[in-house]
Amino acid sequence: MPTVYLIRHTKPDVPKGICYGQSDVPLATSFLEESDRTLAIFRSLVSTDPVKFVSSPLQRSLRLAQVLSGWQEVQTDERLKEMNFGAWEMQAWGAIDEFMLNAWMRDFVSLAPPDGETFQALVRRSVQALEDAVADLPEGYENLCLVAHAGIVRALLAHVLEIPLPKAFSLEIDYGSISAIRYDALYSSVLFMNR
C-alpha cells in the first residue's frame, strides 16, 4: 500500500479577503523560507525511497512541488486545482452578493457559485486524480506526493475518513503543511494531518 503525502502550497501573494480559487496567483515573498520549512519536514518523513510527484498546475503548488522533488520531473493534473469559484474569482468576499453568498455557504457541497463548481464536484475529481496517480505509480515506488490546495487536501481526507462533506472544513490545513494517508482501494487510513 503506497503512502500518499498531501501537501498544501505555501502562502500566495493575495490581499486578505479575496476569493482566488483557481486563479493563478503569485507566491508571497516568504516562499523560500516557507518552502525550506516544508522541505525539511518532508525529508524527515520520507526516506531515500523514490517518490512520484503530481501537482496542481497552478504556480503556487507547482513551485513547491519542484522544490520538494529537487527540481526533478513533476507531473501536473488539472483535477488537483483548487475549487472553481467562477464569477467570484478575484473578487473581495465582501463584494459578492450577500444573498447568493449566504445561500452558497449554507450548502456549498451541492450549490455552485455562478459559473463555478460544487464542493461535491471537487471531491469527485480529486478522488479520481488520486486513484489514477496511485494506479500510475512506477514499479518499486511506495511514495506518492500530491501538491495541491486546501480544498483538495480536505476533500481527500474527508473521503478517506468518510466524514460528511460539510464537516471537511473543520479540518485545519495550514499553508505548506503535510498530511498523509496509507492508500488502498478497499480501505485507506489517515496516518497524520497538518504537520
Image (cartoon, helix red, strand yellow):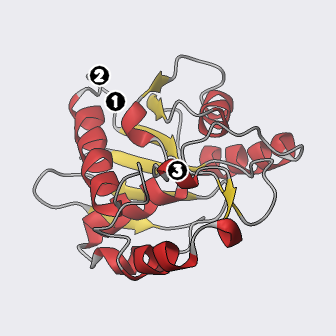
Q: Which residue was labeled with disc 3?
A: 87
The answer to the question of whether label 1 and label 3 lie on touching residues, with beta carbons closer than 8 A, is no
The answer to the question of whether label 2 and label 3 lie on touching residues, with beta carbons closer than 8 A, is no
For residue 49, side relative to residue 132 (left or right): right
Name the residue type under label 3: Ala
Q: Is mark 3 on a helix, strand or loop?
A: helix
Q: What element carries label 1?
A: loop
Picture layout, residue 175 above or below residue 5: below
Name the residue type under label 1: Tyr
Q: Position of residue 143 (x, y in %)?
A: 40, 39
Q: Where is residue 189 in the image (x, y as percent from the top left)?
A: 28, 65
Instruction: Give the residue at x 56% y 74%.
Output: 172
The answer to the question of whether label 2 and label 1 lie on touching residues, with beta carbons closer than 8 A, is yes
For residue 104, side relative to residue 178 (left or right): left
N-terminal of the two: label 1 or label 3? 3
Q: Position of residue 36 (x, y in %)?
A: 78, 43
Q: Which residue lies furthest to the left in this view?
A: 186
The answer to whether one can see residue 171 in this image is: no
Q: Quadrant of the image for the C terminus?
A: bottom right
Decide: few, some or many residues near mark 2? Use Cα within 10 Å; few <14, some 14-19, many ≥20.
few
Q: Which residue was labeled with disc 2?
A: 138
Q: Exactly how many numbered labels are in the figure?
A: 3
The answer to whether one can see residue 27 in this image is: yes
For residue 45, side relative to residue 76 (left or right): right
Q: Which residue was labeled with disc 1?
A: 141
Q: Where is residue 42 in the image (x, y as percent from the top left)?
A: 61, 47
Nearer mark to the viewer, of 2 and 3: 3
